[in-house]
Image: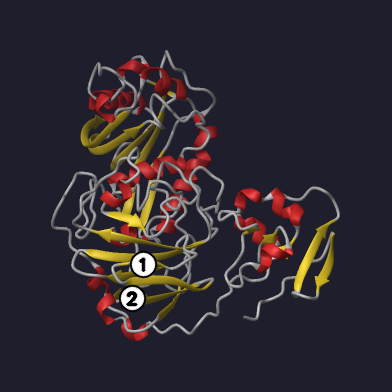
Amino acid sequence: MNRKNAIISGGVAVVLVASIGLVLLQSNSVTATKYTSCADLNSTYDTGVAFSAAAAALDEDILEPFIDPITYQSNLHLDDDSDQVVCELPYVQENPDNWESLSQPLETCKLQETENFFGGGSKGFPAKRWNSALGKVKIAVIPVDFENAPGEGSPEDLYNDDIQKMIEWADFFSQGKMNYEIEFNAPEWIRAPRGAEWYTCTNCQKGSIKDLQTPAQGAQEIISAADKGYDFKGVEMVYFVFPYEAERDFGTAIYGFNEKFTTNEGAIKASIYGEMGGGVGAQSDRSVIWDHAVHELLHFQGFVGHGPSNWTGHYITVDQWGPSKAVTSWEGFLNEWFDEEQILCLDSKSIDGGVFITLDAITNFGPKHESVMVRLNNEEIIVVERHEEGPFSTMCTDCYSSVSEGFVAYRVNVNSAHYRNDGDPNSDAKNFWSFLGSRTAPTIKDPVEFKGVQISLAGKNQVKISMTE
């Protein structure tokens, strides 16, 4: 294989190793930059960095990396496969796309959910939700404190940026199909009429032992306390922000689907949510709330979330607030955010030979498709997406919720049970959807396969889909 050479200049000495045609880089100093992600490192070293020429020569299927042991050692945390090369890129020749004759109407991929219904949203079509996911959606964000758990700082100073971020995020990922209109008027914390122990939800398992009133009654008290400064007309969802101490010490939490409330503007019906970790393990940092708020609001809007696996940060609905803020294209499709501009629908029965497809990133969007969906049968489908740095998304392989640039694939069975148990290592296998490949690092490097359909890399922005049976 003819491997491409990589040469860098500026602050380093370049030495050619003639016998193997590699480039040896030696830093002028004994320290090197430590990068937070492969995307950052590749912006300087576009083909990765190897510890030695011998390590770089072991794999002929990668673009020739820079040889710099000092930079490698400084970025050892990015060497996911421990091959002494960090952030390497595959050497593959992209092929002309050949999917057009195989493209199916989107109806082909609209799998109907007919079994194993549950109250947390839809696995398949038609979508079921508590609150609208299209058009104008009015939300009240209310920072609430208590005499025995006072808030710190000015909520306006703390959260004005979060409010704007929520609005921008909704417009971007819904592709303009949904607009968050947010009611937020809190120069000071809204003081609840009772102590924090009165606003709990034992059924939510957030640390409280006994409810002194129902969550709906507590929410009504807070809404009444905020009514002087808030316009609740048309509000569909309410997101409460509580001080960390309230959740830690009292298990303060509020949760409810489309409860009825009285306001100065008349009766409203709204879903309500309030907590950021609850009780044990509560998130102490309340300086950024927008991604958690979006995550929870999306559950009301029909996004099941916490999948395909709850162990990576590829989506805003995974875990609580991973580094990537994208939505899965399956849920975007289900909730009418994505259509034929974003989704390419194929039927596995029509695939004969290799199908080459170039995709834009689900985190960025562009003129090409962002998702490929391969229908297997009436209830199963494979979804392929590509991720990269975006306006709301960071590639972060060393974060608690790892996410890296590249392709992922996952399978969906719209009639399997929804099973989420973070303590069960086999949770993914029991759930209606899961990544193909590694659950903790699902970015495709080697081919992945499910029920005779194989997905492999055909280029940085291109995948090959073929049948193995």
Say how the picture is coloured: secondary structure
| Horizontal side, residue 386 vs residue 257: left or right | right
Mark 1 vs 2, N-terminal side: 1
Distance CA(mark 1)–CA(mark 2): 8 Å
The structure residue drawn at horizontal position 26% and vertical position 24%, both measured from the top left corner, is 202
Asked whether the residues under the numbered discs 1 and 2 touch, taking CB atoms below 8 Å apart as contact, a structural biologist would say yes
The structure residue drawn at horizontal position 61% and vertical position 57%, both measured from the top left corner, is 38
> Is any atom of residue 79 visible in this view?
yes
Amino acid type for the residue under numbered disc 2: Thr
Amino acid type for the residue under numbered disc 1: Glu
Q: Which image quadrant is residue 87 in? A: bottom right
Marking on residue 468: 2
Marking on residue 146: none
Relative depth, front residue between 420 and 178: 420
Which residue position holds label 1? 449
The structure residue drawn at horizontal position 53% and vertical position 42%, both measured from the top left corner, is 161
Q: Residues within 10 Å of mark 2 (few under 14, many from 20)?
A: few
